[in-house]
Image (cartoon, helix red, strand yellow):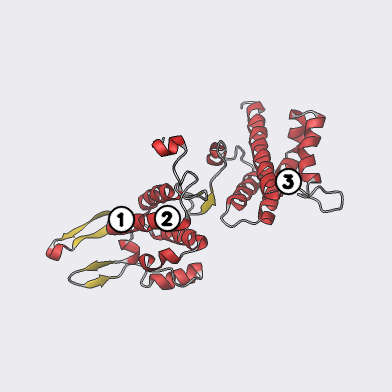
Amino acid sequence: MVHKYYSQRTGTNPNLKGLALDDTIDLFVRVFDQLKGDGFFDEAFGFYCVDGDYIDGTVKDVELEMLLNIRKKNLWPISDNALNYSEDDFLDVIEFLHQYVSKPIDGTMHSWGDCGMHWETFNKNEGKKEFRNKINSVLGHYKNRFELTVKGEVLHKPEAGFEQIFEADVPSKDENIVGRVNAATTNFRRHGSSIDDRRQAVRDLADVLEYLKPQVQELLTNKDEKDLFNIANNFGIRHHNDKQKTTYDAAIWLSWMFYFYLSTIHVVLRKIGHDKPKV
C-alpha cells in the first residue's frame, strides 16, 4: 500500500487528483534516463563507448523505427522532444519502448575513461517486467488513469473495485466466449476509445449473454432475465429505432452497462462451471 502523506490525508495537496501531463512526462523522462543509463536499452538502441564512439544496437535508426511504427516525427530523442508530447505521443512512446527494452544480465567492464559496462547478455522478459513496474508507477501519478499491460498496451485503468475482474481469466473454455469478452474489454479500455467503440464493447458483451441465454434462464427469474436484456435492447445498444431511449449521458451509462454485463458474464460462467457434474 502506498503511504499517503499529511497533505494527501487532509485533502490540502494541490495534486490530489493527479499530476498534469507535462509534470507526468517530466517523471517519465527521468525514469527513462535512469533505465537507459542502467543499460536497459543498450541491446536495441546501442550505447556510447569512449574508444569506438557509438556502438549500434539492433535498431540502427531509432527515429526511423518510430516513424515506421508510430507514423509520427519529432518523438526521438526523448530528452529533446518529450516536453512537446501530446498525451497520444506520450502513450505511443511508452508502448514503443516496451517492445525494445531488455534487462542487462552480463557483460564486460570497460574501465578506460570510466566508460562503464559493455553489456552482452540481455533478458527481454525481465526487462519488460521492470519497465512496466516503473512506468505504471509514473502513470499512477497522472490525473488521467492509465496502465501499461503485460501485452504492452496502455489501457484505461479499471474503476475502483473492479480491478480483480480484469486480472481474472474468463472462466470458460469456449473460445467464442473468451475471445469476444477479451476483445470487448480491450476495446472499452483502449486509450482514445470513442463512445461508439464503448457502445460496441457493451453490445459484444450483450451478445455473449445472448449466447448464454439458455443458462441465464435457468439462473434468473423470467422478470430478471427480461430486465437484463432490456438494457441493451431498449437503450440504443443493439437496435436502432425511434423507440430507443438515447437521451442519457453515454459516457457514464455505457461505463455502468459495461461493468454490469462483464460482472454478470463472470457470475454466470462461474455458476455454470460450479454446477457441472464432476467427472
Classify mark 1: residues with Cα within 10 Å, few (<14), some (14-19) or many (20+).
Answer: few
Which quadrant holds the C terminus?
top right
Q: Are marks 2 and 1 in contact (CB under 8 Å)?
A: no
Of 104 and 76, nearer the camera is 76
Classify mark 2: residues with Cα within 10 Å, few (<14), some (14-19) or many (20+).
Answer: few
Q: Are marks 3 and 2 in contact (CB under 8 Å)?
A: no
Report whether 253 appears left or right of 19: right
Which quadrant holds the N terminus?
top left
Q: Secondary structure at mark 3?
A: helix
The amino acid pointed to by label 1 is Gln
Residue 222 image-quadrant placement: top right
Could you say which disc has been placed on residue 23 in the image?
A: 2
State the residue position of label 3: 207
Which residue is found at the position 44% from the left and 71% from the top?
74
Of 107 and 197, nearer the camera is 197
Q: CA distance from mark 2 to mark 1?
A: 17 Å
**Residue 222 appearing in the image:** yes
Residue 146: percent from left, percent from top? 51, 50
Q: CA distance from mark 3 to mark 2?
A: 42 Å
First in residue order: circle 1 vs circle 3: 1
Q: Secondary structure at mark 2?
A: helix
Of 37 and 119, nearer the camera is 37
6 shown above or below 132: above
Q: CA distance from mark 1 to mark 3?
A: 47 Å
Residue 88: percent from left, percent from top? 52, 61
Report whether 229 appears left or right of 77: right
Could you say which disc has been placed on residue 34 in the image?
A: 1
Q: Secondary structure at mark 1?
A: helix
Residue 193: percent from left, percent from top? 61, 56
The amino acid pointed to by label 3 is Asp
Which residue is found at the position 45% from the left and 46% from the top?
14
